[in-house]
Image (cartoon, rainbow, N blue to C red):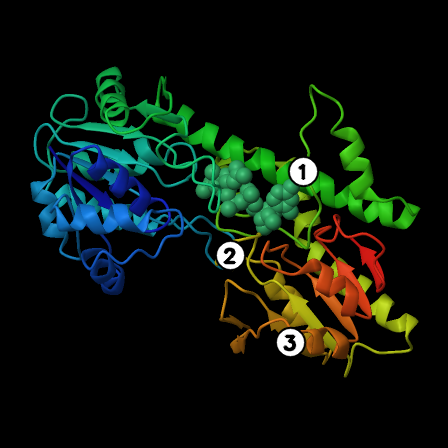
Amino acid sequence: AVIGVIGLGYVGLPLAVEKAKAGYKVIGFDIQAHRVQMVNEGTNYIGDVVDEDLKELVQKGLLKATTDYSLISEVDACAICVPTPLDQYQQPNISYVESSTKSIAKYLHPGMLVVLESTTYPGTTEEVVKPILEETGLKVGKDFYLAYSPERVDPGNKVYNTKNTPKVVGGVTPQCTKVAAALYRSVLEGEVHEVSSPRVAEMEKILENTFRNINIGLANEMAILCHKMGIDVWEVIDAAKTKPYGFMAFYPGPGLGGHCIPIDPFYLTWKAREYNYHTRLIEVAGEINNAMPEFVIDRAMKILNRYGKAMNGSKVLVLGVAYKKDIDDYRESPVLPIVEMLEKYQARITVCDPHISSFKVAGKVYETVDLTVDLLKEADLVLITTDHSRFDYQMIADHAKAIFDTRNALKEIKNIQADYEKL
Ligand code: SAJ
């Protein structure tokens, strides 16, 4: 069987590799020609994919990439793994899902399986994807199969990957569920959990990520309150963790980054309006998470103030741009608004991030630099915003004058010389 994967990003490429490793002939589709070229050269650009696998599969002819969507005519099953961002009005943008579905519809043939994997609001598969495919005159469940199966990828996770993470599958008809589940079972090791409809599968994915968003919001609210009360919130959370049942630790941070957790819950908020329901909990958590960059800047200003320094003209060394540790992705990173505010208050900013060489904020490009003792000594304030493992925290503790640590990154360091504050 020939399998198509549309969208060769952090979801699509690992999925394409796993399907090719299972022995299927895989055609990867992407609108970005440079990604297609890199795949066909066996050059990996997704951290979690094993380079050798990619190279070998391409050389064996089991995996190839193309921008030519007419090759969909050759595939028996097709997974849609394209981005589902929010637009500038915080509204869902499922245009990539729609365009991919239209491309598939052009080449839809009897017996074909289509699976949507992109995170989206409940109803997308049946209200958007299904009608586009049935415009061909082919009938779902009879002439072709359609299901929803949410991706679960945790960038940088060394334990769980595409192959071993359990997968939920919901088909438009029972037969669709069976066909989709059978394909995943032939590729993946983890449990394939069948549900009764695409809407259940779409909603469970949103629940997973909203659960994280809300609990991170709670951790951030606790951090703000604990600071006012002079309590160490990190010590509080570690103590709460001793409860062996019914508690799960989440930690405060400089804000909520990534292209899932800050975004997915608002797909549900948007859909809920259709049912005249106001998802208050999601919105309040969003407000708290979005207020964290400002809280960080306020804390930084107060620390500088202790030295009689205004933010204006102070040397602030920002350690970490990525939205979480040990990855090279800074999309939606809370460090972006933090840098933007430091700029607005005319701090003299230097940024270090071993995984990111340059980044853009409000139209300005910043080049990151290597962390050195001199940079630490010269800085009026060191802001730890991403707790990358590659940072030398002993060196930071030994040479910085003042540190504001938003990630409890120095938790292992004893007797810190610097003037040290945590979130
Ligand atoms: N964060 C906190 N405190 C925490 C946990 C996370 O501030 O206790 C922050 C992180 O720093 C980051 C953001 O939240 O900025 C998102 O963190 P994340 O670990 O949820 O990261 P993602 O978005 O890279 O990956 C998540 C998956 N991660 C985990 O489950 C651990 C998972 O939620 C989804 O499978 C995936 O997004 C997705 O693609 O939906």
- Outermost residue on the bottom side: it is 313
Give the residue number, with chain letter if any, for mark 1: 250
Which amino acid type corresponds to the residue marked 3 in the rendered image?
A: Thr
Q: Residues within 10 Å of mark 1 (few under 14, many from 20)?
A: some
Determine whether, in the image, residue 290 is placed left or right of residue 91: right
Q: Secondary structure at mark 3?
A: strand
Dot 1 or dot 2: first in sequence order is: 2
Q: Say which label, 1 or 3, has the lower sequence index.
A: 1
Q: Earlier in the sequence, mark 2 or mark 3?
A: 2
> How far apart, in angstroms, are the residues tagged by discs 1 and 3?
29 Å
Residue 390, quarter of picture: bottom right
Q: Secondary structure at mark 2?
A: loop
- Is 150 placed left or right of 214 in the picture? left
What residue is drawn where x is 62% and y is 60%?
391
List x then y, in percent, for residue 32.
Answer: 26, 61
Residue under numbered circle 2: 89
Instruction: Look at the numbered discs 1 and 2 and tell me whether their residues touch, using CB distance below 8 Å.
Output: no
The image quarter in which residue 11 lies? top left
- Residue 278 makes an appearance in the image: no
Judge by depth and name the residue closer to the eye, 347 or 337: 347
Q: CA distance from mark 1 to mark 2?
A: 29 Å
Pair 2/3: label in front: 3
Residue where numbered disc 3 is placed: 350
Helix, strand or loop under label 1:
loop
The type of residue carrying mark 1 is Phe
- For ligand 1, the image quadrant comes to top right
Position in image of residue 191 (x %, y %): 38, 21
Q: Position of residue 249 (x, y in %)?
A: 68, 34
Amino acid residing under circle 2: Tyr
